[in-house]
Amino acid sequence: MTAKASSPAPADPNAPLLEVKNLRIQFHTESGVFRAVDGVSFSVRRGATLGIVGESGCGKSVTSLGIMRLIAQPPGRYAGGEVLFEGRDILKISEKEMRGLRGGRMGMIFQEPMTSLNPVYTIGDQIIESLRAHGVTDRKAARKRAIEMLDLVKLPSPESRVDDFPHQLSGGQRQRVMIALALVNDPELLIADEPTTALDVTVQAQILELMRDLRERTGSAIVLITHDLGVVAETCDDVVVMYAGQVVEKAPVAELFAGPQHPYTLGLMAAVPRLDAQTDRLETIPGSVPPPYLQLPGCRFASRCPLATDHCRAAPPPLREIGPGRAVACWKAPIEEIAA
Amino acid sequence: MSAAASPAPSSKAPVLEVSHLTKHFPVKGGVFGRKGGSVQAVTDVTFSVAPGETLAIVGESGCGKSTTGRALLRLLEPDSGTVKLDGEDITALSPSRLQAARRQMQMVFQDPFGSLNPRMNVRETLMEPILLHGVATGAAAEKRVSDLLKTVGLNEFHAERFPHEFSGGQRQRICIARALSTRPRLIVCDEPVSALDVSVQAQIVNLLQDLQRQFGMAYVFISHDLAVVRHIARRVAVMYLGRVVEMADAAEIFATPRHPYTRALIAAAPKPVPGATLGREEIKGDAPSALRPPSGCAFHPRCPLAQDRCRTERPELRQVGGAMTACHFAETVATMDAPAETERPATLLRRLDVLAKARAAAAATPAA
């Protein structure tokens, strides 16, 4: 509803809504150059949910902030790549135009519902501010819309809660407000960075349900950043697995869980304790992620991979297509073929 | 009473016996700071832990699980109730006797960043309890420090380093080494792996299990993560708004949950199986405030099975089958469908097997 006249009409409904191509984001620190995101590529289909999964420091959050152009420069720097939103590289547009997209056609939900709402304004004022920033001039209509949004995210008695301050709400309710705030201008793309990590499981289940429900109703595409494979399995259509700033595997969700290819993805799945069965001992991934300042010539997972050869340590494996929507960055995949 | 509360009491005398433990925090309100009620953090909690056993306390934030853990070590003074460690009531001990008793009970906290002194290197951190409790002195104490480091999977050279030089998982290993330093009978672990990534979490969980086999101490394992609890615990106590609502052997409670809240927790946990959400019964809303717990059963405002009786009459913890459950309708809940075990996909298992064999082969031939 706030689409700028300058944006090209979406010609092909099957064209991806968002395409990230070879994105590189670096931070210049005293200890050296930290390649947080190092050649990341993926695309998001309209109305679909893409999960980006990985452990701390893998670059998943920096990727999401990078898409929204929220990387502080300096110390951060876009060192290459493109972020195509409906075919247009948003890394090249003006900051003014970007502000129009942010909170408008691109919404974002952050992990911390406690700190990402302004404590001195009522939640209604914050939603109204976003509406007015994106072209709604009538204050009464904006307030009515704010109440509608709070109702949509199932905040109880929205007519009175609209005048509450953030501290009067519980964590789950605040996250509902954050979702209302992100969705108020009907975004085509919603970026959610660990939206349920700070919440209790019963509340998390409600919020995930709400996000699934809203996606069906509004048709927004979602990029969901998470460390939780359970959340990925329940909410995503496609998955990108990241390790040390790079994409190591991409797959439709069912295929990823049925037969992960990359040894890191395999290790991750084996390390998760199971709720549905008794296990004797958890599998671990020995070692730890290489320090981010280290420039490794080969595969970044090689030091922790039992299958690694000298070739793996010398040459970085490309992310190669192995099927529709499937790609893996491993010289050894599919690994069952090397079993002697 | 306390013996009756444990569903399968071990033949050995319990290392820890907690009965009717209660801790309420007064809340000051009004202009003159008069008492304005109290947060009923822990109310009438009773359980026991056998030597070498792991009892998990699970629940969501604000359920009182951490307060219980702290009250066990008297890091918080309980309002009433007793905590017996090897038969000795620690709630009645004088400060000097309490310090001696603390040698037998240690704690590992959730936040490995906040629970180590940033100005003390690892040697100093580990040496402090060793000297304080007179475990060893001089060269023997030095030896103890390097032994402890090896026990938790660190190296001797780590002794000279400071906390900021370690990753989260390594810091948690240091915290575990510190807890082990006095050779305790009991370690209270408060969310010890919640701040860690899954691959590191698995390493720490395995370490805790190995140490228990090696040294035979009991754990009270406080966690919100049911999958970790199922893996590590022999018995499980589920808390809701300050009270234990269900307690049973781990196998029993996951196969046949008898309290609607336990069922809800198991159902709500995201499972790494696409499509597993279907048929989940929804629990509405957030947990109410512990300042004003609901009447009757504290879970009734969110419970799908709540009846009039639940709003007025608080269900006592009672024996139902193999569990202690505080629900008027526990018999009905027990007959409801249990979560089914899912088979892991064959391709996944085959590939994991390839990795495991490669790892075993690498371990057999030391790397050049």
Image: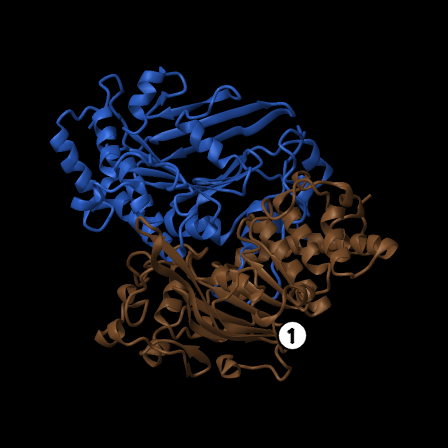
Chain colours: A blue, B brown
Residue B24 in percent (x, y) is at 42, 63
Examine the rendered structure and indicate whether residue B333 appears above or below residue B105: below
Quadrant of image for the N terminus of chain A: top left
SS for dot 1: loop
Q: State the residue at coordinates (30%, 25%).
A: A101
**Chain where mark 1 sits:** B
Observer-nearest of B89 and B189: B89
In the displayed structure, B335 sits above or below A15; it is below
Q: Is residue B297 at least partly visible in the picture?
A: yes
Kindly indicate the quadrant of the structure image that contains residue A318: top right
Residue in the picture at 30% in, 51% down: B30
* Horizontal side, residue B346 vs residue B140: left or right: left
- Residue at the disc numbered 1: B51
Callout 1, which amino acid? Pro
Residue with the most extreme front position: B32
Asked if B279 appears above or below A54 in the picture, the reply is below
- Identified at 37% across, 30% down, the residue is A18
Q: Where is residue B285 in the image (x, y as percent from the top left)?
A: 29, 56
Q: How many marks?
A: 1
**Which quadrant holds residue B53?**
bottom right
Q: Is residue A32 above or below residue A254?
A: above
Query: Residue A56's spot in the image, x, y percent?
Result: 54, 41
How crowded pointer 1 is (Cα within 10 Å; few <14, some 14-19, many 20+) is rated as some
